Image (spheres, grey):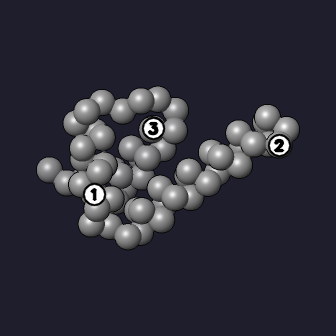
Amino acid sequence: MIPSCKQTSLLLSQAQDRPLGLSDRLRLRVHLAICERCRRVSAHFDFLRTAIQRYRDGD
């Protein structure tokens, strides 16, 4: 079953803190393949994570 955008955003958030299980990764991948908005949210999460890591590392 394809998760909703709300479920997908929750999975994206959880993926920032811990590895997702296989079924969650697959559900996430399927949803992101069809939903442009959630792909943008995912890109924003990635950008923020990178920015925070660089700030923390002093780059």
How far is the residue under mark 3 from the one under mark 1? 16 Å
Dot 1 or dot 2, earlier in sequence = 1
Q: Position of residue 15 (x, y in %)?
A: 45, 38
Residue placed at 41% from the left, 30% from the top? 19
Residue occupying image coordinates x 45% and y 38%: 14
Q: Which residue is mark 1?
A: 31
Residue at far left of view:
1
Mark 3 element type:
helix
Q: Between marks 1 and 2, how big is the CA–CA gap? A: 34 Å
Please name the residue shown 39% across and 44% down the image. 11
Instruction: Provide the residue designation for mark 2.
Output: 59
In the foreground, 30 or 6? 30
Q: Is residue 6 left or right of residue 56?
A: left
Q: Earlier in the sequence, mark 2 or mark 3?
A: 3
Binning the other alpha carbons within 10 Å of mark 3 as few (below 14), some (14 to 19) or many (20 upward) gives few
> Nearer the observer, disc 1 or disc 2?
2
Which of pointers 3 and 1 lies earlier in the amino acid sequence?
3
Camera-nearest label, 2 or 3: 2
Q: Residue at x 52, y 58 (%)?
A: 43
Q: Which residue is mark 3?
A: 14
Q: Residue furthest front?
A: 59
Determine which of the numbered discs, if any, sits on residue 53 in the image: none
- Between the residue at mark 2 and the residue at mark 3, the CA separation in whole angstroms equals 26 Å
Give the number of callouts: 3
Q: Are marks 1 and 2 in contact (CB under 8 Å)?
A: no
Question: The disc labelled 2 sits on which kind of residue?
Answer: Asp
* Three-letter amino acid code of the residue under disc 1: His
Q: Amino acid at mark 3?
A: Gln
Helix, strand or loop at mark 1: helix
Residue 57 picture location, percent across and down: 79, 34
Dividing the picture into quadrants, the one containing residue 52 is top right
Which callout, 3 or 1, points to the residue nearer the camera?
Answer: 1
